[in-house]
Image (tube, helix red, strand yellow):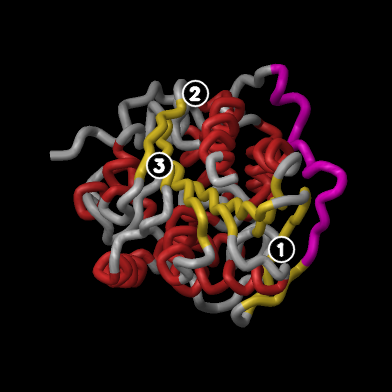
Amino acid sequence: MLPNLFPPLTPKPLAAMPQTPSAQRGIAPFPAGFDVSEIATNGTTLHVRVGGHGRAVVLLHGYGETGDMWVPMATDLARDYRVVVPDLRGMGLSARPQGGYDKKTQGDDIAGVLDALEITSALVVAHDIGNMVGYAFAAQYRDRVARLVLIDAPLPGVGPWEEILKSPLLWHFRFGGPDMERLVAGRERIYLDRFWNEFSADPAHFTEAAREHYAALYARPGAMHAGFAQFAAFDQDAIDNQRFVEEGKLTVPVLAVGGEKSFGPMMAVVARFAATDVEEAVIANSGHWIMEENPDETVAVVRAFLDKAS
């Protein structure tokens, strides 16, 4: 049996959480010097921010957020790296095509973005559904990924996937379809609050400003449909990932990072089913939302790992 991947958290109401002083400052913008463009790739268009100089680092976000989650890390890394931050297919300010939400296809999306930017090889840092896209990219383009960071989410079909699915907190993996979209229409904030509250060590660290920001983005036309499509693709993702593993585990260095109150060391257990060279790290006092709950430690841990490549 697996340990409890999501330790019990103190229930919090869905109303706005008490705010820390930093919460009052709102969502920080990307630093001056970051360019924003819409890049055509693989039959769709991704909203991409690019800044800094040096070896390329790609930052891939997950559900409930957009590339905006990476501002603190992008700000730090841009001192020494060329940082590429897309919104995934259908999410944030990227286009919302009807299909292509399997992560193998989205790995091709990322390859197309790098082609457009004339980047042949990159370091990849991913969180949540970004893990799945990042792994699919690394598995298909093994000569283009120098290092991979996977943060606090499983890989469909890899390792203890079937056991992970049994967690009652993951009912949203099967939530979607026209009626579910009707249920959440106009109530996007309520639906997303559930994620930000239940998967945080302390929901107050996912600030009111951040909640308003992301809720507004997910309330845009087609955004919730596209978000549900990310989860609906998990069965195909599991098939694709099993094939990737059969072709051979990744041999590039992988850092598996878990929030102390979320996946914790289980991230490394998952990663070792898909990669041969895995380091592990646990972010203290954090649940799933590591960039909101403990950004300083997260940035330090990731940077230390990436810097080993130089």
Identify residue for label 1.
47
Quadrant occupied by the C terminus? top right
Whether the magenta-drawn stretch holds residue 204 is answered as no
Does residue 152 sit above or below 103 in this rendering? above
Does residue 262 sit above or below 278 in this rendering? above
240 and 188: which is toward the camera: 240
- Disc 3 element: strand
Identify residue for label 2.
202
The residue under the point 52% across, 51% down is 62
Residue 254 drawn at (x, y percent): 42, 47
Check disc 2: other Cα within 10 Å, few if <14, some if 14-19, many if 20+: many
The answer to whether residue 94 shows anywhere in this view is yes
Q: How far is disc 3 from disc 1 in space, using C-alphas?
A: 27 Å
Identify residue for label 3.
256
On the rendered structure, is 111 left or right of 283? right
* Earlier sequence position, callout 3 versus callout 1: 1
Residues marked 3 and 1 touching at CB (< 8 Å): no
The residue under the point 64% across, 47% down is 215
Residues marked 1 and 2 touching at CB (< 8 Å): no
The residue under the point 40% across, 42% down is 256
- The three-letter amino acid code for the residue at tag 2 is Asp
- Disc 2 element: loop
Q: In the current view of this chain or complex, which residue is farthest to the top?
A: 21
* Earlier sequence position, callout 2 versus callout 3: 2
Q: Which residues are magenta?
A: 21-37
